[in-house]
């Protein structure tokens, strides 16, 4: 596998992979505000927009069931920007099993060029991060299994929900779900994907 990461056009981080026989996602963590943010601050400060109108539900073991469900009328509808913590503790079986958000959203449109999958905005700094990708899915993970055992910069212990990820990918469990886009590569074929993290100020 070959991976290229570089600053692109001044305000973008370009991530490109070429490989055979693989399905990678990207666990990129970006801080748009200050260090040492608490779970409450993350949930209150950040507004999330996720373009897709469908997601793949999980079972109690966090494995996709194979279903494809609309986000309409659920806590998974981020098509209009919503605070990350606004609905995270609602009475919803999917949120209960994931201990928050840990779900794949289905990106539509032509995959020959990166298209916008998600955007997160931090209102105090005015900074926003846009995620563009050629991948068919983006996983929103709200840091549900962070437990304070990982210590990062400035000796900050990462407690539950004190961070989040937007991971571009093929759908989890694709080899066992024939209705999902295939992640299997045949001989002499290559896996190519491009993900762009674009930083903007408002």
Image (tube, helix red, strand yellow):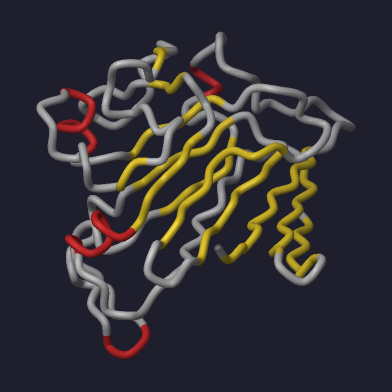
In the picture, measured across the screen, residue 12 lies left or right of residue 123, that is right
In the picture, measured across the screen, residue 111 lies left or right of residue 171, that is right
Check the image and report above or below for 71 versus 43. Answer: above
Q: Name the foreground residue: 183 vs 108.
A: 108
Residue in the picture at 47% in, 52% down: 120
Check the image and report above or below for 179 versus 190. Answer: above
Q: Position of residue 91 (x, y in %)?
A: 10, 27
Q: Residue furthest front?
A: 202
Check the image and report above or below for 95 versus 126. Answer: above
Q: Quadrant of the C terminus?
A: bottom right
Q: Position of residue 111 (x, y in %)?
A: 76, 29
Residue in the picture at 17% in, 61% down: 40
Quadrant in the picture for residue 148: bottom left
Q: Position of residue 63 (x, y in %)?
A: 34, 27
Q: Name the foreground residue: 70 vs 98.
A: 70
Residue in the picture at 47% in, 26% down: 173
């Amino acid at each position: 596998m070959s991976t290229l990461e570089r600053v692109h056009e001044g305000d973008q981080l370009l991530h490109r992979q070429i490989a055979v026989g693989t399905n990678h996602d990207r666990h990129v963590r970006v801080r748009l505000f200050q260090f040492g943010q608490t779970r409450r601050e993350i949930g209150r400060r950040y507004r999330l927009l996720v373009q897709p109108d469908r997601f793949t539900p999980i079972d109690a073991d966090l494995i996709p069931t194979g279903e494809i469900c609309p986000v309409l009328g659920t806590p998974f509808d981020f098509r209009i920007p919503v605070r990350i913590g606004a609905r995270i503790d609602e009475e919803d079986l999917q949120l209960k099993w994931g201990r928050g958000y840990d779900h794949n959203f289905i990106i539509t449109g032509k995959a020959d060029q990166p298209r916008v999958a998600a955007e997160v905005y931090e209102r105090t700094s005015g900074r926003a991060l846009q995620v563009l990708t050629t991948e068919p899915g983006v996983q929103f993970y709200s840091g549900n299994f962070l437990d304070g055992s990982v210590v990062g910069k400035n000796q900050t212990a990462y407690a539950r929900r004190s961070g989040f990820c937007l991971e571009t990918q093929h759908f989890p469990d694709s080899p066992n779900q024939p209705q999902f886009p295939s992640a299997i590569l045949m001989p002499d074929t290559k896996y190519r994907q491009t993900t762009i993290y674009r930083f903007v100020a408002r």
